[in-house]
Image (cartoon, helix red, strand yellow):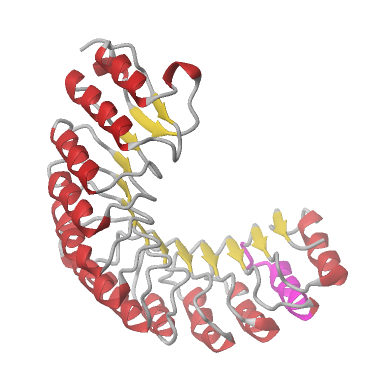
């Protein structure tokens, strides 16, 4: 295959150069077989422009691997057009980004029905006006596409019921999802407990989980109880702005101390942990079994007192922390002095420090 079919690997929405300023030009270039990569102007592509692009890609039957159309004013009708395009690329498409488009549950259903025949690896559906009604289709997608490893559903109102349906896929042997983003999905402690149940089916695959900006309440404690008792492959956990307090920290310490835990990155930013919570957390950082390398505590109500507790932990021979984020805390000049001194000392592992000047 020559021309586009031989060379086109990805189509991405971004600021474009003069040669491909409009999608009509993209179509002409595609049909003419002279397009290697095709950028689209972010947020400016009208529906007709994307239709031109889809038509051009269908004509040449290219082996499309990456398609990025975030914030391109896609709606229900264009979802159907994209679904048809997916039929022509069942073996080649590896990455699809249609985030920040008003696809809705019906539009995503059209895409999901066709994605089952692909070998897609990464799927981005953030800010797509989805509700819990789409999650049954997402479940079927996860249960029928063994190649899918990364799924981003953030900023959609899935709620507890949607998360519950989604988590059923974890019990299906075919599902081998490694990265899941459910930030700002409107679920609570009930949804968090469903995650625990789902992860218990297949605790060996999921490596990265983002459930930030959900009101998890006591559900996060249930999640910590699960993490400390089950051998789990989770390496990155993001829990920013989840209404956590210092009362959650004792269970989190047990997670960090557990020999079953392989957690390397933890984000607790935007939770009111305070100095008391940080002091408790440091007990886990000094454990010989703690593997944590990156810790983010931005906007957590920490003062110089909390910095002193962190300093003691960072100086411990057991500490593996190389990156620490503390922006947005009232750490003052003394806190800066204490922690920057540790960062600058080659005897300690801390290399990157984010803190207010």
Residue 291 in sight in this render:
no
Q: Main structural element of the magenta stretch: helix, strand or loop?
A: helix
Q: Is residue 322 left or right of residue 304?
A: left
Whole-percent x and y of residue 162? 25, 71
Count the numbered circles shown.
0
Q: Which residues are magenta?
A: 305-320
In the image, 334 versus 317, the foreground residue is: 334
Could you tell me which quadrant the N terminus lies in?
A: top left
Q: Residue 79: x and y, percent?
A: 22, 44
Q: Quadrant of the C terminus?
A: bottom right
Against 256, residue 350 (above or below) is above
Residue 3 on the magenta segment: no
Q: 110 and 243: which one is in front?
A: 110
Q: Is residue 63 above or below residue 300?
A: above
Quarter of the figure with residue 332: bottom right
Rendering quarter of residue 169: bottom left
Q: Is residue 24 above or below residue 200?
A: above
Q: Quadrant of residue 82?
A: top left
- Residue at coordinates 29% horizontally, 20% vertically from top-left? 27
Q: Is residue 134 visible?
A: yes
Residue 296 screen position, x and y as percent: 61, 65
């Amino acid at each position: 295959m020559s021309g586009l079919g031989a060379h086109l690997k990805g189509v991405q929405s971004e600021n474009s150069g003069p040669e491909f300023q409009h999608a009509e030009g993209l179509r002409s270039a595609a049909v003419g077989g002279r397009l290697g990569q095709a950028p689209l102007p972010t947020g400016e592509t009208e529906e007709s422009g994307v239709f031109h692009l889809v038509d051009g890609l269908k004509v040449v039957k290219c082996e499309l691997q990456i398609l990025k159309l975030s914030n391109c004013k896609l709606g229900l009708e264009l979802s159907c057009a994209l679904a048809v395009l997916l039929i022509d690329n069942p073996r080649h498409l590896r990455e699809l980004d249609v985030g920040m488009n008003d696809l809705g549950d019906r539009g995503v259903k059209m895409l999901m029905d066709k994605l089952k025949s692909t070998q897609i690896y990464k799927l981005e559906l953030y800010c797509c006006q989805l509700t819990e009604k789409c999650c049954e289709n997402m479940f079927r997608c996860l249960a029928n596409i063994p190649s899918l490893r990364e799924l981003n559903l953030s900023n959609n109102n899935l709620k507890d019921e949607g998360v519950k349906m989604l988590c059923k896929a974890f019990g299906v042997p075919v599902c081998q999802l490694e990265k899941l983003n459910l930030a700002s999905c409107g679920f609570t402690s009930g949804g968090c407990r469903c995650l625990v149940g789902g992860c218990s089916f297949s605790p060996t695959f999921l490596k990265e989980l983002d459930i930030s900006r959900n009101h998890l309440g006591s559900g996060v404690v249930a999640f910590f109880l699960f993490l400390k008792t089950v051998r789990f492959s989770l390496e990155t956990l993001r829990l920013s702005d989840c209404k956590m307090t210092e009362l959650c920290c004792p269970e989190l310490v047990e997670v960090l101390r557990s020999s079953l835990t392989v957690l390397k990155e933890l984000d607790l930013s935007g939770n009111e942990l305070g100095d008391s919570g940080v002091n408790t957390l440091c007990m886990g950082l000094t454990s010989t079994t703690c593997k944590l390398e990156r810790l983010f505590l931005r906007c957590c109500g920490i003062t110089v007192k909390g910095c002193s507790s962190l300093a003691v932990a960072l100086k411990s021979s057991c500490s593996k922390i190389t990156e620490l984020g503390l922006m947005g805390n009232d750490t003052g000049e003394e806190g800066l002095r204490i922690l920057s001194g540790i960062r600058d000392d080659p005897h300690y592992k801390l290399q990157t420090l984010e803190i207010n000047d």
